[in-house]
Amino acid sequence: MKEKDPKEAKRELIFKVAVEVFSTQGYHNATMSEIATAAGIGKGTIYEYFSSKLQLFQQMMEKGIQTYYASFDAEELQRKPVQERLRLIMEGHINFCRQQSRLPKLFFWETGIQDEEVKEWMLQMRKEKEAHLQELLTEGIKSGELRDHNPYIMAFMVSGIIGSVWAPLVLDEWDVDTGLLADSITDNIMNGIKNRA
Amino acid sequence: MKEKDPKEAKRELIFKVAVEVFSTQGYHNATMSEIATAAGIGKGTIYEYFSSKLQLFQQMMEKGIQTYYASFDAEELQRKPVQERLRLIMEGHINFCRQQSRLPKLFFWETGIQDEEVKEWMLQMRKEKEAHLQELLTEGIKSGELRDHNPYIMAFMVSGIIGSVWAPLVLDEWDVDTGLLADSITDNIMNGIKNRA
Amino acid sequence: MKEKDPKEAKRELIFKVAVEVFSTQGYHNATMSEIATAAGIGKGTIYEYFSSKLQLFQQMMEKGIQTYYASFDAEELQRKPVQERLRLIMEGHINFCRQQSRLPKLFFWETGIQDEEVKEWMLQMRKEKEAHLQELLTEGIKSGELRDHNPYIMAFMVSGIIGSVWAPLVLDEWDVDTGLLADSITDNIMNGIKNRA
Amino acid sequence: MKEKDPKEAKRELIFKVAVEVFSTQGYHNATMSEIATAAGIGKGTIYEYFSSKLQLFQQMMEKGIQTYYASFDAEELQRKPVQERLRLIMEGHINFCRQQSRLPKLFFWETGIQDEEVKEWMLQMRKEKEAHLQELLTEGIKSGELRDHNPYIMAFMVSGIIGSVWAPLVLDEWDVDTGLLADSITDNIMNGIKNRA
DNA sequence: CATGAATGAGACTTCATTCAT
DNA sequence: CATGAATGAAGTCTCATTCAT
C-alpha cells in the first residue's frame, strides 16, 4: 500500500533534486548534468521522465504550487472572520517557507526564464493569487469587517507582504516563532502601524 | 550647452537599450548581439564601452539605483512625520516605476545572475533599503507616532508593499493617479485595513 | 589483449590529429574546429577529453616528450664512452624525427604561445636537455676523453646541432641512412672539421 | 644633411617598436593597438606606412636580415682561411644578438605565422644561409683546410651551432667576452671536442 | 530502461582593418 | 596626414539534447 510506483518514485527524486539545484543556481546556471549527478542518475535518464529542461522546471513549479495550496486547510478557512483567515494564510505561508526553504525563492524570484508559456503561466499564478485575496478582502468589506477601500490595492499590498516574508526567513535564517510572526503581521495588516493610544 | 560628450552619449544609448533588452529578456536570455542591433551599432562597439556583458549589466544597475535614490528629495524627507515621509517614498517609487517602467523589474526580480559579486551587491541593496526603512520606523516609534512593534517586521512588510506596486503599474499598465495611490497605500499602512467605524 | 580502453583510444586519436594540425598550422592558426574535423568528430567532443585548447597542446607536448625520452634506451647509455653515448643520442634523435616527423617541429620551433605556464615549461625543457648534455660532457672531461673546455659552451653547441638535424630530415625529406648520419655527425662533433692529415 | 625624410623616420620608429613588441609577445599575441600605443601614435597611422600586420612583420624581418648581413664585413671575409672566416661570422652573430637582442629571436624562433608567402620566405632564408655556409665549407675542403666530409651535413651542423648561441646570450643574459666566445666556438667546430693530448 | 559519450547551435569576446573627422 | 571609434568575421567554449549500447 505504501509501495509507490517506482517510476513515480524517481520522478519525485528528480523533483526534489531539481528544487535544490534550480533554487541554488537559478534556472540558467543550473545544468542538467548537475541535476543528474546530484540525483545519482544518468543524464539521459532525466529525459525518460521529462522532455526538456524547461518542462522539468515547469512541472516542478506546478507541483510546488499544489503543495503550497495544499498547505492551507481549505475547509478550515471557510466561514471565519477575515482576520482569522489572513492569519491562517500567513501561518501556512511561513510554514511552507520554513519547510521548503528553496522552493519559494523560485516562486517569487525566478524570472530569468523567458519562455512565453512559462511567463504567461507565472503571471497567471500571480493574478490568481491576487484575485483570491481580492475576493477574501471584498467579502470582508461587504461584511463590514474591513474598511471600504479599494480591494485591488489592498490585495497587492497584502500579496507583497506575503512575498516579503520569505527573504528574512530563508536568506537571513530568521528563527522566530511561527505563531507570533503570523500574529504580528496580521495585526499590522489589520490595524496598521500608527499609534492610536 | 546641451551638447554632451559624444562618448558619454553613446554610453547613455547603450544603457538605455540595455535596460530595455535586459528587462524584457532577462539577463541570460539577452544577447550582446541583440543589444547591439537594438542600439543600431555593431556588436564590437559595446565592448569599447563595457568590458563584458556582466559589467554592462552591473553598471546599468548601479546607474539605475542612483537615479532611483535621486528621485527622492532627501532634504524634503527630513523633519516630517513618518506618515508624510512614507507617502513621499511611495510617491517617488510610483513615479520611478512609471517613468522607467522596465528598470524596476530588474531591481526587484532579476536573480538569475549567479556571479558572486553581483549577488552580494544585490543582497546588500536589499539590506540597505530595509535598514533605511527600519531606521525611519524606529524613529517613529520613539517619537510615539507609531505603535511599539518590532520594527524589523514592519520594515520588511513595508518593503514588500513597495515592491508589490511595480507589477500592477507596469505589467497591468494600471492608470491611476499617483497622489491618490500613494495616499491610499500610506493610509492602509498606517491605519490598517480593519474597519473601526 | 590489444583491446584498449575506448576512452583512451579516442584521446590517442585526438593527440595524433593534434600533432598533425598544430605542427602544420602552428598553435594559433590551428582551430579546434579544424582538429575536430580532421579527427572526424564533433567540436564539442574534444572538450570531453581536454578542458581547453591550451591544455590539449600542453598534454600533447608532454606526451611527446615522454615518447622522445623513451626512444633512448637509458640502460644502454650508461657506462659507455662519451663518443658512443653521443652517437646513440643522435641515432635516437634521428629515428624520432623520422617516425614522428611533425612532433619535433613543435618541440624545437613553436614559441608563439605566450601563456606563462607553457613558456616556463618549454624553457625548463631546454634547460634540462642542456643540463643533461652538460653532465655527460663534464664526465667526459673528467675521464680525460674530452678536451678540458667550457662544458656549458660545448653543451649548447651540441644541443644546437641536435636541433638542426630536424629541418633536413623532415622539411627536405632527406633520405639518408640513420647509422651513417649519426656516425658522421658524432665524428664531426668529436674530431672537428679541420683536416689534420 | 642629417635630416631624414620625416616619413622615413616614422617608418623607422614603427620598425623599432615592432621588433620590441613582436619579439616580446610573438606575432599572434601582439596587437596593432599595442604597437601603436608603444610608438605613441594612432592605430590608423600604422596603416599609412604598412598595409597590414603581416606586411609590417615581413618588412621588419627583411630589414632585420639586411642589418644582420650588413654586420659582416663582406670584403674582410674574402680571401681568408675558413677558420678565420667562421670566427668572424660567429663574432658578427654574437654582436648582433647582443645589440638587437630581441630581433634574432624572431629570426630563429617565430614560426607561428603560417602565411604561405612568409613561410616560403623564411624557408628560403634558411636555405640561403646554409647554402652560403656550404659554399664556404666546400671551398675549405677543396683547399685542403677542411676534412673531406659531406659539406651538407657540416653546413647544417654549423648552422645549428650558430642558432644555438642566441638562447644563452639573450634568455640567460650570459655575460661573456665576445672574442673569447667566438674563439672557443670556432675552435670546437674546427678541432672537435675530443682530447687528443 | 538506463546511460553517458557525442554533438553542434549559439554565446561571448577579440582585434585587424576601415573611414569619417 | 593622423586619428581612433566603429565594425564584424572568426575563434573558443558551453550545454541541452540525442542515441547506440
Image: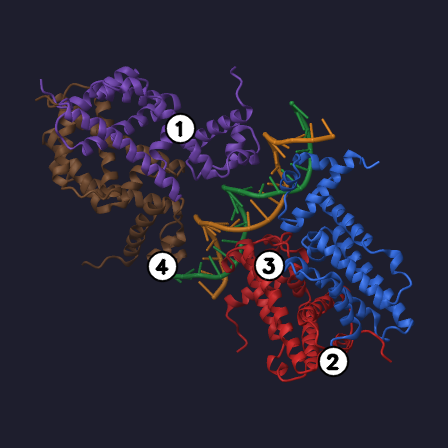
Chain colours: A blue, B red, C purple, D brown, E orange, F green
Give the CA separation, mark 1 to mark 2: 82 Å
Displayed quadrant of residue A17: top right
| Element type at mark 2 | loop
Give the CA separation, mark 3 to mark 4: 30 Å
Residue B163 located left or right of residue D98: right
Q: Nearer the viewer, residue A62 or C103?
A: A62
Q: Are marks 2 and 3 in contact (CB under 8 Å)?
A: no
Give the CA separation, mark 4 to mark 1: 44 Å
| Element type at mark 1 | helix
Observer-side mark, 4 or 2, equals 2
Chain letter for the residue marked with disc 3 in the picture: B
Q: Give the residue pinned by disc 4.
A: D41
Observer-side mark, 2 or 3, equals 2
Neighbor class of circle 2 (other Cα within 10 Å; few <14, some 14-19, many 20+) is some
Give the CA separation, mark 4 to mark 2: 71 Å
Q: Give the residue pinned by disc 3.
A: B40
Q: Amino acid at mark 2?
A: Asn
Chain letter for the residue marked with disc 2 in the picture: A
Neighbor class of circle 4 (other Cα within 10 Å; few <14, some 14-19, many 20+) is some
Q: Give the residue pinned by disc 1.
A: C64
Q: Residue at x 24, y 42 (%)?
A: D172
Q: Amino acid at mark 4?
A: Ile
Q: Give the residue pinned by disc 2.
A: A195
